[in-house]
Image (tube, rainbow, N blue to C red):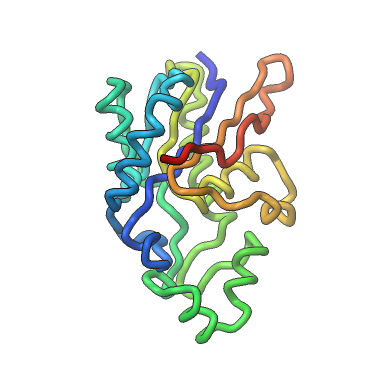
Amino acid sequence: MTLRRLVLWRHGETDFNASGRMQGQLDSVLTQVGWNQARFAVPVLARFSPDLVVASDLRRATDTATVFTNATGVPLRIDKRLRETNLGIWQGMTSVEIDEQWPGSRQAWQTDPTWSPPGGESRVEVAARAYELIADLDRADSGVSTVLLCAHGGLTAALTGHLLELPVTAWAKLGGIGNCHWTVLERRLTSGLAWRLIIYNAGITG
């Protein structure tokens, strides 16, 4: 069976999101709002009929994913290749603090996918490690057609740019991903298996 559809789902709101701090690979936890966001999203995401859910091993993504798998019975795998961007020494800091200590650097990071924070990784590197998972899922004997990946905003945007084969210089044109929002990519067997963007940063409020 060939992998035909990817649903990229960002985790729900965390304590770091609520306080305006950069998470990166720090293991933050869902707020009550985040748990509710995940519950609200389940009925909509279930319509995509995923064969498998794969989640980042960071707690905020794993917890979000289990809300879906507990409600639907879809199998869950955990894979550290879906971790958010390592933001190095920026992790745990606010945007104001970063701008004070590294003027202009945050803008460079936002606009240049090859740029990495001090001690961190670039979005190009993030996309490359996430794509390794896609390649594994894409084997002819994987037995899955639709996969729900529960991960992070930065990873989702980077992986989307990579899968669409966009020039790296154009990746920044893809907007950010809201908490518990999702992006969908599909491909046709008749079009050389190229990925197409169907939905970007969709979600519900409540």
Residue in the foreground of this view, choosing between 161 and 178? 178
Residue at left offset 43%, top offset 54%? 84
Judge from the rendering whether residue 42 lies leftward or rightward of residue 105; answer left or right: left
Vertical position of residue 39 compared to residue 59: above or below: above
Judge from the rendering whether residue 37 lies leftward or rightward of residue 200; answer left or right: left
| Quarter holding residue 109 | bottom right
Residue in the foreground of this view, choosing between 56 and 41? 41
Which quadrant would the C terminus be assigned to in this image?
top left
Residue 177 at x, y percent in the picture: 53, 48
How many numbered discs? 0
Residue at left offset 58%, top offset 72%? 106
Residue 97 at x, y percent in the picture: 46, 81
Vertical position of residue 172 compared to residue 182: above or below: below
Residue at left offset 50%, top offset 13%? 1
| Quarter holding residue 116 | bottom right
Residue in the foreground of this view, choosing between 158 and 142? 158
| Quarter holding residue 79 | top left
Residue at left offset 40%, top offset 69%? 91
Residue 43 at x, y percent in the picture: 39, 24
**Residue at the outermost bottom position:** 101
**Residue at the outermost front position:** 206
